[in-house]
Image (tube, helix red, strand yellow):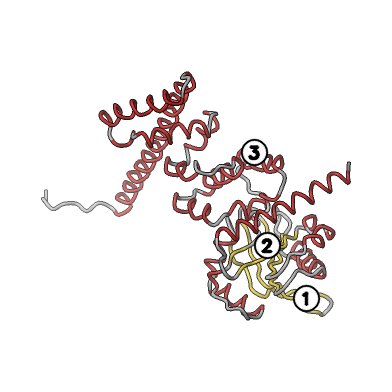
Amino acid sequence: MSGKAVEPAPQLLGDIRQLIEGARQQASVALNACQTALYWHIGQRIHTELLAGERAAYGAQIVATVSRQLVQEYGRGFTEKNLRRMVQFAQTYPDENNVATLWRHLSWSHFRELLPLDKPLQRDFYAEMARIEGWSVRTLRERIDAMLYERTALSQQPDALIQQELATLRQTGQLQPALVLKDPYVLDFLGLQDRYLEKDLEDAILRELEGFLLELGAGFSFVARQKRIQLDQDDFYIDLLFYNRRLKRLVAIDLKLGDFKAEYKGQMELYLRWLAKHEQEPGEAPPLGIILCSGNKKREQIELLELDASGIHVAEYLTALPSKEVLQAKLNQAVAVSRARLDNRSGDEA
């Protein structure tokens, strides 16, 4: 019998490596979940103790005393600052069953990014999207900094409807258009100057397609540029055509310079009906249209034209990134106007 070592089959080694890596991944996920659950329970227990105290000074003293003892026994992870964050965690997510669903998917580092958000609906949106889309902590931070929630169509709806959409997302994991469509779209990465043509915009998007897909949002993939449609011996062209796997539908994008015009509706409706007839596959939802304008959306015209009912979303695009304060003010104004119109419409119907 030869003493020469027998080389294992490559397939055998590959299978074993897969088993090891899979077990390590499962162990890491389980460890993260256990750690986050521990922090919630610690926060909840301290919060209960603080509620029993009658003075604020008592609470501060309790946290400081507990922290000194825990740091001595278990290390720097239990500083007074960290304990207070755990208390905030338990206060922000008082229902253990609800938060347990999140901590099976999100790490403690994710929650540290979510806790400073003071609007519950905003925080719930980011938490659910991070869970469903599998966002890293870095991606979550970038989405928050880019004010993703504030730019979604969802944020301009009444609170009750937002809660309903988020509840559906939590239960089904299925994204609806209001969670994906934005306004405005920030296209500063295209590097366009003050003067440009629609073709320049289209060319820039295709050069920076990866960045444009990221700005469009979850699930988009590129299908075609200048998609040709022939009707009655006339040619029509869709500027950009995408498919969204999460929405399970085609998305046609029309690029416009200047303000929105009412005539754009008929053009996009033609595109969508043609796509529904000739390109939509069985099991897919009807195509959506996005009209991107560099100027004013003309909200009153959009409302009268009932574009939402036609599956058409109108949005502005910005070729230069404004300051966060300017963008926040613009978004706050858009939300206020949108909700005022909804209130007026409800009053008229009543």
Tell me the quarter of the picture where residue 50 sits: top left
**Is 184 left, or right, of 229 in this rendering?**
left
Q: Distance between the residues labelled 3 and 1?
A: 43 Å
- The image shows residue 183 at horizontal and vertical percentages of 66, 59
Instruction: Pick the residue in front: 171 or 57.
Output: 57
Disc assigned to residue 251: 2
**Mark 3 highlights which residue?**
167
Figure check: 139 above or below 112 = below
Nearest to viewer (mark 2 / mark 1) = 2
Q: Which of marks 3 and 1 is in front?
A: 3
Pointer 1 local density, CA inside 10 Å: few below 14, some 14–19, many at least 20: few
Q: What residue type is labelled 1?
A: Gln
Q: Residue tagged by mark 1?
A: 230
Determine the secondary structure under disc 1.
strand
Q: What residue type is labelled 3?
A: Ala
* Circle 3: element type: helix
How far from the left and from the top, in percent, is residue 345? 84, 48
Q: Under tag 2, what secondary structure?
A: strand
First along the sequence among labels 3 and 1: 3
Q: State which quadrant residue 220 falls in.
A: bottom right
Query: Could you tell me which quadrant the C terminus lies in?
Result: top right
